[in-house]
Image (cartoon, rainbow, N blue to C red):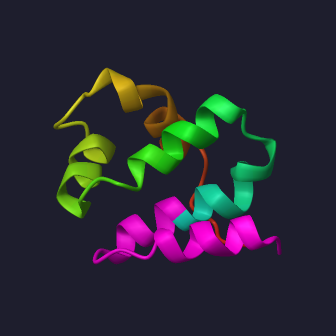
């Protein structure tokens, strides 16, 4: 596992287990194949507070800046390899 993936896994550790699984699952399953734009958006997403990320994930907040990465996280199963 690369240092970048390890760093991101650590940053994905949140206060909500559901959020941990979604975020870490995307990192482990999709990050390597993601575009630079998607990686940047994910990095920016991780700067938000847990309630803000959860609101984006469940659709109560629809900030268009994060729409593409949120859609990707939702589309891919949160299966952690």
Q: Which residues are magenta?
A: 1-23
Q: At 41% from the left edge and 55% from the top edge, which residue is drawn?
A: 46
Prevalent SS, magenta region: helix
Q: Could you tell me how many numbered marks the image carries?
A: 0
Is there any visible trace of residue 28 in the rendered image?
Answer: yes
Location of the C terminus by quadrant is bottom right
Residue 30 image offset from top left, x and y in percent: 71, 50
Q: Quadrant of the N terminus?
A: bottom right
Residue 65 in the magenta stretch? The answer is no
User: Is residue 59 placed above or below 12 in the rendered structure?
Assistant: above
Residue 4: percent from left, percent from top: 71, 65
Q: Residue at x 70, y 63 (%)?
A: 28
Residue at 21% across, 46% down? 55
In depth, the one of 42 and 18 nearer the eye is: 42
Inspect this view and state whether residue 75 appears: no
- 24 vs 36, left or right, is left
Could you tell me residue 63's position as x and y percent? Answer: 26, 27
């Amino acid at each position: 596992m690369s240092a970048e993936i390890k760093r991101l896994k650590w940053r994905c550790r949140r206060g909500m287990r559901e959020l941990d699984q979604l975020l870490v699952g995307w990192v482990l399953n999709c990050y390597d194949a993601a575009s630079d734009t998607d990686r940047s958006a994910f990095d920016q997403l991780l700067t938000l507070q847990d309630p803000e990320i959860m609101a984006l994930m469940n659709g109560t907040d629809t900030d268009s800046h994060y729409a593409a990465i949120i859609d990707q996280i939702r589309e891919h199963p949160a299966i952690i390899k």
